[in-house]
């Protein structure tokens, strides 16, 4: 994975990283300030006097969106043709880091070929609620999975000498009131859920830029949040690149420079440049802070020059083929009763295709990420390319299909025609969410398919011999109300420009489904814990569910799900066996990335055709002293096996994988005690389980003024000293307590209350203060 930054023969980069210190010294104050904001919507500022060029950044993340005409940011003006890969909702469901690296490499090639310096993506925000209108741009509801997939995507893109922009940092998990909402998130939840994917990508792949979010985090705008942008991102994680604002996310530009926001986009028309100059001259902003931001901006400009000097070309056909491969691996076979899929033989000659989305595909999300594809293949196109003349009925009206044959007819008429055509046949019914139902800028109001789609399915299923549903959507939808009307359900997400070809290949068995759900499909929206606090009110959204998002919350409440996180069928079956778990002791010397637990298992293809298994490793802490989800994903693999073949799979867990964030010490700690290791096909299909004892230092629990009797008792030396002062009262809390019920009633009482309430005459307030000074912190 080398970085190709070699200029073409005879070309010289306009600027090198070595030039940056000299240029910063030669810039005027006004020029420095100008470099901290854009020249326009998509370009950084140039300083011609010193030979500093402007470079272009532009939207991604699933394809290049370089607008050919006037810039408008929201995608109304046509962009240059580029390969439209499946958006993140689909890429996340591949569980395939190697494939995603290759997609990233292709994206980097196209970014470079179009003389763009930075592609704005990927997005690693968590899918806190299925209603978030931008979920199609995010990889998963699980931070481990999101990080494992986003890191190779960044590496692949940047291997071509162009940059990425990891976004949106941080806690940007809704579109409602997104430009000003205050996301109030507790410390542990931030550390365990909303920051780890960012951390993994930064520490493993070093994206050139990180994009700050619009929203506030615990009362402070992300664009001027020193804890996020400097203490965590740079001081803890070692981020070396540039922090750029989301477009229009700046609140107080001077505060942003101080906090670590280097580049404001788009241009403020000179407004904030003047404020920076005035702040430096008045002493409210140090020129050293400004120089730091300018240095980072110029470094990114310099890093891009070699690639821009030799942009090259890209192979549109090869990238289209890769887009088809990605769409094929992204699709998740949710249900396949009776092995109705794949279609072949007599069944193939008896097929009718129903649903406008087969002709007018929903292949990407709405908003700033819309790509102008180099080609677009619908499912009907793909069938025709194979010479298959399959009857088609639109079945419902679709806004984006306006003007196409039949779309001027009412839904009930279209539905009746479809039912007649499907009678006694195998009906492949294409359903999904129209573009208006999910988009950047606003959230969904429900998780349901349009009524016209479910009515079509209901009536077709009553008439057809077999029903196969093909779904197109960018986020989870409810299936509980209609899934019994389908023999098979294939979730294709938003398939990109080659999604139609991928769908047909899967339906006909040329390829076997290998996708797994990166987000749970609940029975009801009301079962999702986040919905108690989504999307907030009066400018505030409280993440009251804490760490219990996605499968964590659904598992903790034991809510029934339609399909669990990690689920996905294929055209064969797999067995998991021979689990072995090897555990090492965690000591003070064990580093965060040291392996502590090694897990091995055997995966066997027990079916009759080749297929891909995705064994998933989850861990749980059944006797934990802190709130925990029943299980959390900590490892996975993709294994392609021929019929009857077996493979031994090994997965490793590091100290960090086994840690939780301790809010007393503000650090990652490993809790000693029972560790449950479970491996299987999804978060709720875990046939292999083992419980082992994890040896680790006792969790630090410093005694303080309000520590309880029980907490003092847990520390032998401190308890011995306190017991001596408590006299006979201490006997109540010994193993042979004369009154266990009373002991249970009082053990949670803070020790300081004992002298205050006169419960042990031998312990005075002064005695307590002396003991606290000796064993705890005041």
Image (spheres, rainbow, N blue to C red):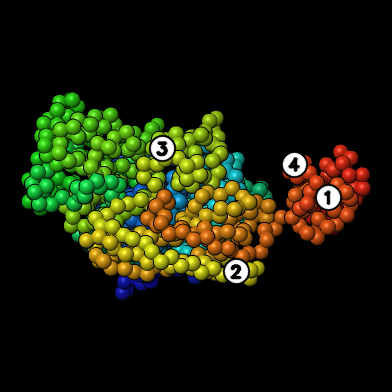
Residue visible at 85% across and 57% down? 721
Nearest to N terminus: mark 2 or mark 1: 2
Q: CA distance from mark 1 to mark 3?
A: 56 Å
The mark lying in front, picked from 3 and 4, is: 4
Mark 2 or mark 3: which comes first in sequence? 3
Q: Nearer the viewer, residue 231 or 417?
A: 417
Q: Position of residue 739 (x, y in %)?
A: 78, 44
Left or right of 381? Residue 79 is right
Whole-number angstrom distance, CA of label 2 to CA of label 1: 36 Å
Front residue (pair 617, 608): 608
Can you identify the residue that label 3 sits on?
131
Q: Which residue is mark 1?
A: 731
Q: Could you tell me if residue 166 is visible in this image?
A: no
Q: Secondary structure at mark 3?
A: loop
Label 1 – label 4 distance at C-alpha: 13 Å
Q: Earlier in the sequence, mark 1 or mark 3?
A: 3
Looking at the image, residue 611 lies above or below residue 431? below
Residue at horizontal 43%, vertical 65%? Answer: 579
In the rendered image, which residue does mark 2 sit on? 585
Using residue 746 as the reference point, say whether residue 91 is left or right of it: left
Would you call the spot at circle 2 few (<14 residues within 10 Å), some (14-19), or many (20 or more)? some
Could you tell me how far apart the alpha carbons at marks 2 and 4 are, in whole angstroms? 37 Å
């Amino acid at each position: 994975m080398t970085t190709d930054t070699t200029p073409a023969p005879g070309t010289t980069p306009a600027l090198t990283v070595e030039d940056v210190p000299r240029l910063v010294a030669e810039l005027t104050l006004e020029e420095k300030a100008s470099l901290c904001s854009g020249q326009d919507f998509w370009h950084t500022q140039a300083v011609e006097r010193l030979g500093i060029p402007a470079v272009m950044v532009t939207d991604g993340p699933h394809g290049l969106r370089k607008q050919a005409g006037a810039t408008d940011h929201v995608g109304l003006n046509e962009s240059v043709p580029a390969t439209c890969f499946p958006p993140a909702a689909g890429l996340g469901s591949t569980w395939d880091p190697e494939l995603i690296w290759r997609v990233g490499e292709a994206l980097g090639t196209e970014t470079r070929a179009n003389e763009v310096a930075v592609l704005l993506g990927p997005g690693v925000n968590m899918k806190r609620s299925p209603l978030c209108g931008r979920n199609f741009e995010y990889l998963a509801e699980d931070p481990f999975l999101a990080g494992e997939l986003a890191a190779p995507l960044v590496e692949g893109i940047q291997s071509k000498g162009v940059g990425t922009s990891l976004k949106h940092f941080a806690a940007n998990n809704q579109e409602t009131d997104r430009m000003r909402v205050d996301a109030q998130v507790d410390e542990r939840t931030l550390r365990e859920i909303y920051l780890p994917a960012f951390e993994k990508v930064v520490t493993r792949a070093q994206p050139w830029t990180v994009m700050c979010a619009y929203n506030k985090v615990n009362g402070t705008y992300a664009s001027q949040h020193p804890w996020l942008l400097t203490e965590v991102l740079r001081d803890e994680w070692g981020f070396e690149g540039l922090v750029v604002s989301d477009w229009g996310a700046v609140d107080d530009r001077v505060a942003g420079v101080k906090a670590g926001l280097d580049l404001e986009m788009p241009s403020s028309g000179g407004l904030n440049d003047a404020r920076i100059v005035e702040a430096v001259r008045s002493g409210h902003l140090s020129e050293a802070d400004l120089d730091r931001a300018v240095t980072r901006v110029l470094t990114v400009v310099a890093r891009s020059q070699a690639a821009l000097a030799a942009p090259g070309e890209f192979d549109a056909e090869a990238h289209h083929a890769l887009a088809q491969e990605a769409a094929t691996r992204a699709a998740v076979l949710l249900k396949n009763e009776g092995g109705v899929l794949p279609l072949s033989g007599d069944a193939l000659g008896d097929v009718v295709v129903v649903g406008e989305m087969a002709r007018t595909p929903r292949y990407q999300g709405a908003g700033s990420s819309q790509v102008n594809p180099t080609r677009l293949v619908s499912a009907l196109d793909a069938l025709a390319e194979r010479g298959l003349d399959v009857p088609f009925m639109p079945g419902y009206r679709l806004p984006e299909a306006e003007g196409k044959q039949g779309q001027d007819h009412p839904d009930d008429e279209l539905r009746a025609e479809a039912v007649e055509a499907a009678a006694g046949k195998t009906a492949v019914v294409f359903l999904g969410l129209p573009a208006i139902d999910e988009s950047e800028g606003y959230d969904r109001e429900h998780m349901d398919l349009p009524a016209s789609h479910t009515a079509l399915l209901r009536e077709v299923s009553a008439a057809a011999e077999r029903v196969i549903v093909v779904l197109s959507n960018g986020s989870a939808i409810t299936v509980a109300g209609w899934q019994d009307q389908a023999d098979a359900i294939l979730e294709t997400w938003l398939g990109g420009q080659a999604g139609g070809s991928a769908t047909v290949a899967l339906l006909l068995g040329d390829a076997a489904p290998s996708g797994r759900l990166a987000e749970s499909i609940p029975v009801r929206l009301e079962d999702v814990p986040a919905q108690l606090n989504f999307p907030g009110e009066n400018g505030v959204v409280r993440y009251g569910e804490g760490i219990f998002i996605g499968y964590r919350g659904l598992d903790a409440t034991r809510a029934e799900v339609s399909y669990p996180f990690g689920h996905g069928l294929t055209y064969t079956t797999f067995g998991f066996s021979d689990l072995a778990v090897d555990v090492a002791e965690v000591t003070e010397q064990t580093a965060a990335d040291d392996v502590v637990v090694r897990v091995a298992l055997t995966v066997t293809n027990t079916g009759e055709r080749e297929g891909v298994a995705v064994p998933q490793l989850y861990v749980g802490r059944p006797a934990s002293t802190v709130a925990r989800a029943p299980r959390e994903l900590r490892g996975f693999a993709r294994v392609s096996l021929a019929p009857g073949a077996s493979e031994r799979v090994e997965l490793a867990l590091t100290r960090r994988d086994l840690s939780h964030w301790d809010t007393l010490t503000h650090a990652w700690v490993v809790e000693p005690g029972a560790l449950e290791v479970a491996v299987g096909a999804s978060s709720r299909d875990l046939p292999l389980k083992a419980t082992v004892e994890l040896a680790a230092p006792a969790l630090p629990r410093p005694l303080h003024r309000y520590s309880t009797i029980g907490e003092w008792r847990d520390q032998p030396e401190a308890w011995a000293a306190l017991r001596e002062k408590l006299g006979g009262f201490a006997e109540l809390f010994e193993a042979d307590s004369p009154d266990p019920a009373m002991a249970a009633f009082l053990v949670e009482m803070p020790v300081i209350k004992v002298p205050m309430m006169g419960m042990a005459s031998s312990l005075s307030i002064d005695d307590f203060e002396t003991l606290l000074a000796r064993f705890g912190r005041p």
